[in-house]
Image (cartoon, rainbow, N blue to C red):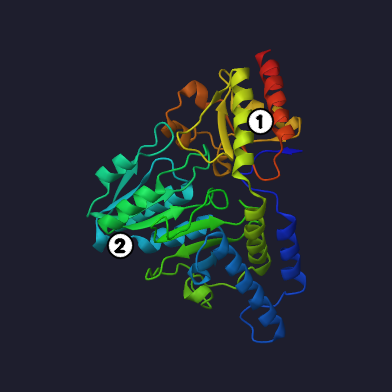
Amino acid sequence: MIYLDNAATTRPSPAAVAALTEAATDCFGNPSSLHQAGMAAHRLLRRAREQVAAALSTDPARITFTSGGTEASNLALQGLADRHKGRRIVTTDAEHPAVLRTLEAVAAAGDFELTLLSTRGGAPSAEEAARVIDKDTALVAMMLVNNETGAVFPVREVGALARAAGARFHVDAVQGFGKLPFSPEGLQCDTLAVSAHKVGGVKGAGALWTAAGVHLKPTLFGGGQEKGLRSGTEPMPAIAAFGAAAEDYRRRYSHGAMQALYDRLEGELTALGCVVHRPPVLCPVILSFSVPGMRAEPMLSLLSARGICVSAGSACAAGKKSDSHVLKAFGLPPELLKGTLRASFSPETTEEDILALVDGVRACMTELAR
């Protein structure tokens, strides 16, 4: 199998699987219990928190474990929106549905005006953000790396704008975590969401970073776990795997190696007549491209039959009939929208994988042209 759909999910790393196994078998106690088994599980919980915090270059006390990036962003956005701070919420037209749909609900419930920054050409402009973010802005939300194009958004600049305006700022760092050097404090944000299964962990664990002095309202009530912000017995196998994966991914990831893979694939696809949708600033783990005159679905089927796994965009939108809102916002014409595929890399990706995809695309073009 040639696996090039790492933006959807990564293969769990051996380190993550080992930590998961330990937490599920040897340290299976409830981390809130005061007996020996519970204390062993609590030590695992503390270690995972420290590992995720180290990957974010931050204080472990700022980390709250969640079920994933979606819950982390929901918890942050519902808690940060404060009508007393202003009437406007600002985000972009290419955010992940976990952010866009949440903000639409928050805006409707709280009588906010929702303003979308344009990402035509790949990313929002800091200049447009400066014109929109003002003293009447209560909340700003922006992703660090786009999950369909790999575009890096101007989060640091927007964070400074939000702080100057007195607005709260949330960052969806799910795709950028482990791939770009940053700290939440350096982004000047109030909250930041990450997910385990994008960096070699397993599904079911994520984390929310919260700045000191920021107080959110819980959306899940119960036993008061995670300092009362996220009740529910912690899923220790997934959390332990998250910590191990976050630590391991930092060791294995090479920006230079990913850039070389991206450049090689871009060159090969362009030579075939494909159109690569390269944003102005990119994180070279996601490459979006179109095959003019071809539709994505039959290409996906033919590539899958050859053992090659790519996607037609966000995994969260798979199977839906509508075109990608991200690619429409990018400015792609309809003839390219229908034939767009996404290849995404991990530290396991090799040049041989890239060339296999190129051969597969060439075969699709020949087969479908008939």
Q: Is residue 67 visible?
A: no
Q: Position of residue 240 (x, y in %)?
A: 66, 66
Secondary structure at badge 1 equals helix
* Image-quadrant location for residue 235: bottom right
Between marks 2 and 1, how big is the CA–CA gap? Answer: 44 Å
Provide the residue designation for mark 2: 82
Residue at horizontal 71 percent and vertical 34 percent from the top: 351
As shown in the figure, which amino acid type bears the numbered disc 1? Leu
Residue 162, placed above or below residue 343: below
Q: Position of residue 20 (x, y in %)?
A: 72, 64
Residue at horizontal 55 percent and vertical 32 percent from the top: 288
Residue at horizontal 64 percent and vertical 83 percent from the top: 33
Determine crowd level at label 1: few under 14, some 14-19, many 20+ residues with C-alpha closer than 10 A.
many
Q: Position of residue 143 (x, y in %)?
A: 45, 48
Residue 266, placed above or below residue 137: above
Q: Is residue 234 left or right of residue 188?
A: right
Residue at horizontal 41 percent and vertical 31 percent from the top: 121
Task: Looking at this view, name the residue that lies furthest to the top.
Answer: 370
